Image: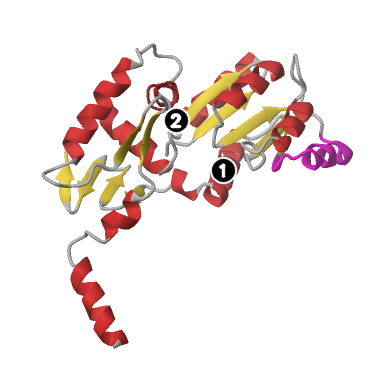
Amino acid sequence: MNARIAVVEDEEALSVLLRYNLEAEGYIVDTIMRGDEADIRLKEIVPDLLILDWMLPGLSGVELCRRLRTRPETERLPIIMLTARGEESERVRGLSVGADDYVVKPFSTPELMARVRAMLRRVRPEKISTLLNAGDIDLDRETHRVRRLGREVKLGPTEFKLLEFFMQSPGRVFSREQLLDGVWGRDIYVDERTVDVHVGRLRKAINRGRQRDPIRTVRGAGYALDENFSASSKAARPGAASLASARDSLVE
């Protein structure tokens, strides 16, 4: 599982605990200590799920939640709110400003992890699926194997992560900075030119002969997995032509 989860929590011990448990389940985790900083960061990169504390310095979790629901890019962002306020009126208030779930401190960590999995399964099933497909490319997250038209493609660990990142959002254009954050992570310094090198290696590995290049370069913007690749490539899978002919003959 490679869903990105943002944790906005000002209690350092709890923030570290959450990060440890989430990363142990395979998630990419960003931790933020202040509400106002989270407001800025979430404009740059939208995670797949947000764990948000109620009481935060700079900007309260309730106000941050309200703001996120007014923005098109975060209006559907899954939000689990953490709070020491257990009264029914406070739970209602948290849900009314847009939180999807509500967990009262102190809480059971296994229960919170189960809620995270359940929410991602409901709203972003592709993030927890072990198999990804785009056109004639199949990627298995568990075995770390990639096949194109049945041929196994040998990829290095970085190229595998890069392809997986693209396949999660076909058609979306990612800047080099976004690819660095999504594939390498914020805690590692890598020059943006490194992205070009690894995209080149990925292209060399997955493209053979006259096979169509599924990775689209957008001048001045970045890279994307071509959104038209899936439809056009499926028609090129072995047997697709004969199946189409058989279907047409049945229609006639």
Local crowd size for mark 1, using a 10 Å CA cut-off: few (<14), some (14–19), many (≥20): few
Separation of marks 2 and 1 at Cα, in angstroms = 13 Å
Residue 114 got which mark? Answer: 1
Q: Are marks 2 and 1 in contact (CB under 8 Å)?
A: no
In the depicted structure, whether residue 162 falls above or below residue 240: above
- Residue 180 painted magenta: no
Q: Is residue 83 left or right of residue 45?
A: right
Between 89 and 64, the one lying in front of the other is 64
Local crowd size for mark 2, using a 10 Å CA cut-off: few (<14), some (14–19), many (≥20): few
Disc 1 secondary structure class: helix
Q: Residue furthest bottom?
A: 252
Residue tagged 2: 24
**x and y percent of residue 148 in the render?**
21, 49
Between 134 and 146, the one lying in front of the other is 134
**x and y percent of residue 246 in the render?**
23, 80
Sequence order check, earlier mark of 2 and 1: 2
Query: Is residue 157 something one can see in this rendering?
Result: no
Q: Is residue 116 left or right of residue 232?
A: right
Q: Where are the magenta residues, as a range? A: 86-101
In the depicted structure, whether residue 235 falls above or below residue 18: below
